[in-house]
Every structure is written in C-alpha cells, then in structure tokens.
Image (cartoon, coloured by chain):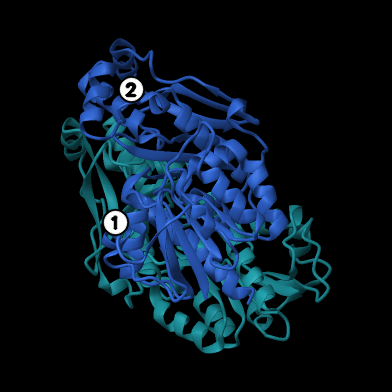
Chain colours: A blue, B cyan
Amino acid sequence: MIRCGVIGYGFLGKALTRTLSERSIEGLRVVAVADSRGYVYSDEGIALAGLSDRLANTRGYLEDDPRSLIDKEMIDLLVELTPTNVRDGEPGLGYLRAALSQGIDVVTANKGPLALAFSELRGLAEGSGALLRYEATVGGGIPIFSLVRSCLRGDVVYSLRGILNGTTNYILSRMHFEGMALDLALREAQMLGIAEKDPSLDVGGIDTASKIVILANSIMHMSCSMRDVRVRGIENITAEAMMSAKESGMTIKLIGSIEDGALSVEPMLVRLNHPLCVHGTLNAVNLKTEILKELTLIGHGAGESTISALINDIYDVVSMRMRRG
Amino acid sequence: MIRCGVIGYGFLGKALTRTLSERSIEGLRVVAVADSRGYVYSDEGIALAGLSDRLANTRGYLEDDPRSLIDKEMIDLLVELTPTNVRDGEPGLGYLRAALSQGIDVVTANKGPLALAFSELRGLAEGSGALLRYEATVGGGIPIFSLVRSCLRGDVVYSLRGILNGTTNYILSRMHFEGMALDLALREAQMLGIAEKDPSLDVGGIDTASKIVILANSIMHMSCSMRDVRVRGIENITAEAMMSAKESGMTIKLIGSIEDGALSVEPMLVRLNHPLCVHGTLNAVNLKTEILKELTLIGHGAGESTISALINDIYDVVSMRMRRG
C-alpha cells in the first residue's frame, strides 16, 4: 500500500481530494493532507469526504510545518500542490528536495521548482531511486510527458512549439476576433478571473518560459533553466498589428518553442488554418519527431482538467511500485 | 528474446523493416518476413538490410503459405501488415486467429479483421494470454489507443468525434478552399495518389466506419461491429452546400462519432475555429472524458507516420514480455 501525503489545499488540492474520495486508486492510501498551517494525518488513511471542515483547524488538525510530513516513516508518495513561485520556487522546491533525497516519490503540479532546478531534482530522484512525475506542470489537460514516455517509444522529438498560457491566448483571441486593444482585453480577462491582478508573469512570457524549460529538460533531455530562454511577451502587440495579421489569414500567438537546442518565447504569426492555432484559453502543443513526424495536442491548460494529469501520474507511481513489489 | 515474424511486405512492411534495420529494439529479434508468396526465416534473426532483394525470390526465400510461420515454435510476436479488406477481413483475419489462439502476441495495422471481429479476437487474446495491439489501424500518426491506455488512467471516455479518413478530408478541403465540385476534387486526389481508383470505401464512409468500430470496442469497451454504424458518405455534398457553410464561418467534414452508445459516420457542419477542423489529409480525434474533460489530437492518418504506431506497439509488447520474464 502506497501511503500518500498531499501538501497544498488550494483549488487543485481540494479538487484532487474530492476526486480521490469519489474513486479510490487501488494500492493508494491518502494518509495526510496539509495546508500552509498544518495537516491532518492518519496512518490508517484519512477520510477524504468533508475534509475542508477538518482542515478548518478543528479536531484532528495538527498545527505544524508541513515539512515534518516529508518523512519516509510517514509517507511513500508526496503530492505537492503548493502555489507556483517562479522566483525562488519555495516552498515547493524545499518540499521536493526533502522528499526526493529520502527516496519518497513525488507527483507535483508546481512549475516553479522544476523550471528553476530541473537537473538538480532529476539528480536527487535518480540518486535515491525516487520517481518524479510532473504532468500537471505544463498544459494541465494535455498529457504531453506521459504521451512522449508511453506512446512515442523509440522515437526522438526534434522540436516543439506550443501555446502554453491560457491567459495570453485569451487576450490575443479577443484582440483577433473583436479588434480589441490589449489593455481592454486584459481588463476583461481580469474581470473574468482569467488573468491575475498582476498579470506580468503571463503577459511577459515568463509563465510560458518556465513551461518551455520543463519541456526541454524532460522531452529533449536538455539541461537548461530559465536564463536559457529568450523571452518576449505580448506587451507591445497593437490592435493594428493584429488586424493586419488577420487580413492575411493569420493571427498573432504567443509561441514557446524549442528548436535546434534554442529555447524561446515570443509573439509569432500563425496561419489561422494551422493545427496549433487554437483560441480562447485553450493550449496546444505541436511536436516534430523522427518517426511519427508531427503531432498536435489541444486541450485546456489549467483548471479541472489538471486533475487528470495528477491522477494519471499517481496511477503511474502506484503501478510502478506495485510491480517492483 | 522475442522472436518476431512480419507478414506483409507492401508499403508498411518495407518501411517498418527499414526502420528496424536502422534502430534495433532491445529484446526483439526479427526472425521472419513474409510476402504473399513465401518468406525468409532464420531462427538467428534475419538481416534486414537489403531484404527486398532476398524477397525477390532468390537465395533463402521459401515459397510457402505465410500461415506456416504462425507457429509458437517459430515466433512469439506476429506483426501483421497484409492489405486491409473490410469485406471478409482475409487474409489478415485468419492470421490473427491462428496467432492469438496459440498465445502468439499480435501487432497489426490491418483494420479489416478488427472492424469485423473485434470481440472474437479480444476473446481469443484473453483466452490464450496473448497481447493484441492495433495502434496503426486508426489514425496511424495519432497514438489514440496508447494515449487512452497510458495517459488517461482512471478516466472514462464519454464520447469521441473524429476526422479519420485523409482522402475525404482532402476532397472536402479542396471543395472548401477552392470552391471545387466533388468529382473534380476526387479526380485530383486520384491523380495525386491520395484517393484510390475505386474510392467508394473512402467516399462512402466505410473506411471511417471501420475505424469507429475499432475505437468503440477498444476505448469505450463496447461490443459492436460494422452493422452497428449509421453511415452516410460525402457523395451528395455539393459545391453550393460547401459555399453556404463557408459563408457562416463553418465547413463540412466527414465526422465519425461515438456518442451515448450510438455509432455514426456522416458529413457534419464544423466551425472553422474548432480544434477538430483540420484540413488536407490530416486526421483529428476529439475525446470527451470524465476527468480530463476534452482533448484533441491532430496528426497524419496514414503513410510513414504509421510506423510510429507499429514501433510503439512492438516496444509495448516487448517490455510487457520482458517484465513478466
């Protein structure tokens, strides 16, 4: 039985535990759920229904640093869902280091630690024999890492281009279809909860860059980090530029790409008929490979679809562990 | 070591053996390659380079029914690549029955046998413990079966819609973009080698229907066959109908679908901005699921990309067998 601890009880933590309370995964026992102030723990497995109430600091809730949970005596698998921080990766990076160095398997949705320290974390995992899965970090509803691992065996990915940020894609789509100026489309996105109050990470291309770093390390086996990405955001895209693209059967999209070992994020002209050209908050990834040649995946980048990535990663860890005995 | 026999030495057989001669798969030994008149066989493994010459009825070539290869004493894995026949499935269906009933694993690119006898073949495989893989039968460059198996674990696919026939999609795309009449676009496709001399299986929707049957049996765990599909082809699509769709920001596509347990193939209006709306010979599959919600895959339906499906299936069989010891 794999003893699983979940750290992070925001949108994803709540949605994941709700899903796990409705369908159990054979071989998995959730023994702990932590928020930033403490946790509930039971070696026998905790009841996932009604968890929010218990985490509201009542019976069974222990006020303590969640890090004390990351102990091989207490859990075998850490599901790490704390908020992304692409500046120093904390608190997630510390949690991942603690888990992987002890041989505790990790499933995470947290881009920050992987974008900042992919090679180090991969090294820790290899050193201790821990499994590290991060499907949810890039295009939550697009199973790109497991696809490359399980569906393209023997193949080599040459290059990748993607629309990896739903906020900017929403803004650019509104500019394209409605002729809106960027600041108006951004304000609309903020009102709808699609853009954050401080949208600079999205609009400036940093969020996309962090995903490109994870993809390059994972899929192309590169060793690179944020400083290796040439980043240009969409700040300077005018309504006029968008209209002129539209008149030529094109549009402007924020494209993250890995080509010939070079990582970049920049607004690019894309033909309206190209498979990559998706609108609204959709994400898309286009792969070029040696044997398959070309494949495009389109899905939701965030929100509930991300639960699918976490569930599949958890299944993967459990089945690998069950197999090894 | 898995001893592999390849039956069928047309486009796919040649391309696969060429690929396997350039990159070996650990644990796999190709011991036989057969065309319709006979085969080359060596228990030590046959040299894959220069195979065409040897199959041209010279030294080492045995004139014999390829069926005599399908023997547990001679091979562990049959890669079946004979031409598709959706009327009676032969000769592939007989080969598959012979292999699966003996416990010989099968990787096939042949739609006919699976569309006609999916339940029977699945039953034979389960009975003997053989593995049956058929990624190449539907959207050769879209790894839909392995994606559902390995990337959507714990999820349930509710419905599926797809553009699954490159020939009709090419014709409809020419009608959309050039305002061509169907017969003209069809003749062009025939000249380019995209449509066959007798295009009735493609144009009439039968090819798409056979793929929908395989998808429904495999992904939705249904037990259905060709007679369960309501099929309408594109024969009656006029240039005028296409133009009128275009004026509303739509186009007409031949869509295979599985919804609420009902299987159908018919021309449908599709929004030009919908992810499923791909053009030329591209294929696309759109899934709706319980956890992931929605995912679209776009790739080449046939040609060289299909080799990727065969290679991944072969890797899958080899790794499953190595694991079981």
User: Vertically, is A316 above or below B184?
Assistant: below
Using the rendered image of the protein, determine whether residue B306 is visible from the camera's viewpoint.
yes
Question: Counting other residues with Cα less than 10 Å from the Cα at mark 1, is it few (<14), some (14-19), or many (20 or more)?
Answer: few
Picture coordinates of residue B293 (x, y %)?
A: 31, 54
Picture coordinates of residue B71 (x, y %)?
A: 67, 85
User: Vertically, is A294 above or below B131?
Assistant: above
Using the rendered image of the protein, determine whether residue B138 is visible from the camera's viewpoint.
no
Please name whichever residue, A166 or A200, is drawn nearer the observer in this view of the structure.
Answer: A200
| N-terminal-most mark, 1 or 2 | 1
Task: Answer with left or right where residue A208 lies relative to residue A259.
Answer: left
Residue behind mark 2: A249
Q: Quadrant of residue A201?
A: top left
Please name whichever residue, B250 or B9, is drawn nearer the observer in this view of the structure.
Answer: B250
Q: What kind of residue is marked 1?
A: Ala
Task: Answer with left or right where residue A54 lies relative to residue B89.
Answer: left
Q: What kind of residue is marked 2?
A: Gly
Question: Counting other residues with Cα less than 10 Å from the Cα at mark 2, is it few (<14), some (14-19), or many (20 or more)?
Answer: few
Picture coordinates of residue A304 (x, y %)?
A: 32, 51
Point 35% across, 26% down: residue: A199
Point 59% across, 70% down: residue: A321
Point 31% across, 30% down: residue: A196
Task: Label 2: state its secondary structure.
Answer: loop
Residue behind mark 1: A56
Point 69% across, 72% down: residue: B4
Q: Quadrant of residue B309?
A: bottom right
